[in-house]
Amino acid sequence: MAREITILQKLDHPNVVKLLGLATSRMQYSLYLVFDFMVSDLSRIITHKDERLTEPQVKCYMQQLLSGLQHCHGRGILHRDIKGSNLLIDRSGMLKIADFGLANSFEPDKKRPLTSRVVTLWYRAPELLLGSTDYGVGIDLWSAGCLLAEMFTGRPIMPGRTEVIFVFRA
């Protein structure tokens, strides 16, 4: 959790959740991160049975997602778990990237091995499926592309239960 807090403190953008504070529980010896209240997440909106997202709505959400990712990547942060349930929506329809628990710092000029066991399987880039530990912003952008298709179709474009299935689909 310390890495997540450090990363969140580096980020200040309208499309990234803002860490407002920390709370503790003496009874449970727990630490809680405090954020603004968000009414929904993109996953719930995408899977809403009664209505599909319109093209202007998809464009608006994608612009916000890519703007937030550009901010993260510009500050040397890979999110590494972009998916609908980690994209929160506030009362005004503003999208905010959340859940930086798998996020990590990176420097494009300095290569260091990173784990390939990141990103929820349905949104995992081919290089991660093949076990690469040398990757960059492309993994977040692949996940964003999967979400773009999902916003239009209303369902994940690459559902599956194992990495082997995904390797043959990707």
Image (spheres, rainbow, N blue to C red):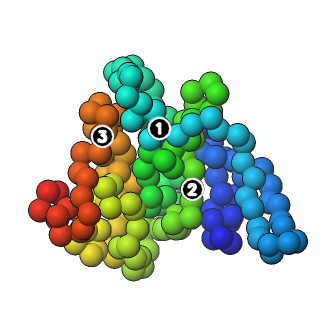
Left or right, residue 75 beside residue 47: right
Q: Amino acid at mark 1?
A: Arg
Give the residue displayed 42% in from the left and 23% down from the top: 57
What residue does disc 1 label? 44
The Cα–Cα distance between marks 1 and 3, rounded to whole angstroms, is 11 Å
Secondary element at tag 3: loop
Residue 131, disc: none
Residue drawn where x is 18% and y is 69% of the image: 164
Q: Residues within 10 Å of mark 2 (few under 14, many from 20)?
A: some
Q: Position of residue 153 (x, y in %)?
A: 27, 33
- In the displayed structure image, the side of residue 97 where residue 57 appears, left or right: left
Comparing marks 2 and 1, which lies closer to the viewer? 1
In the rendered image, the quadrant that contains the N terminus is bottom right
From the image, tell me which residue sits under label 2.
Answer: 99
Q: Residue at x 27, y 75 (%)?
A: 131
Q: Is residue 2 above or below residue 21?
A: below
Q: Earlier in the sequence, mark 2 or mark 1?
A: 1
Residue flagged by tag 2: what amino acid is it?
Answer: Asp
Mark 2 → mark 1, Cα distance in angstroms: 16 Å
Q: Secondary structure at mark 1?
A: helix
Which residue occupies 31% across, 34% down? 154
The residue where tag 3 is placed is: 155
Q: Quadrant of the C terminus?
A: bottom left
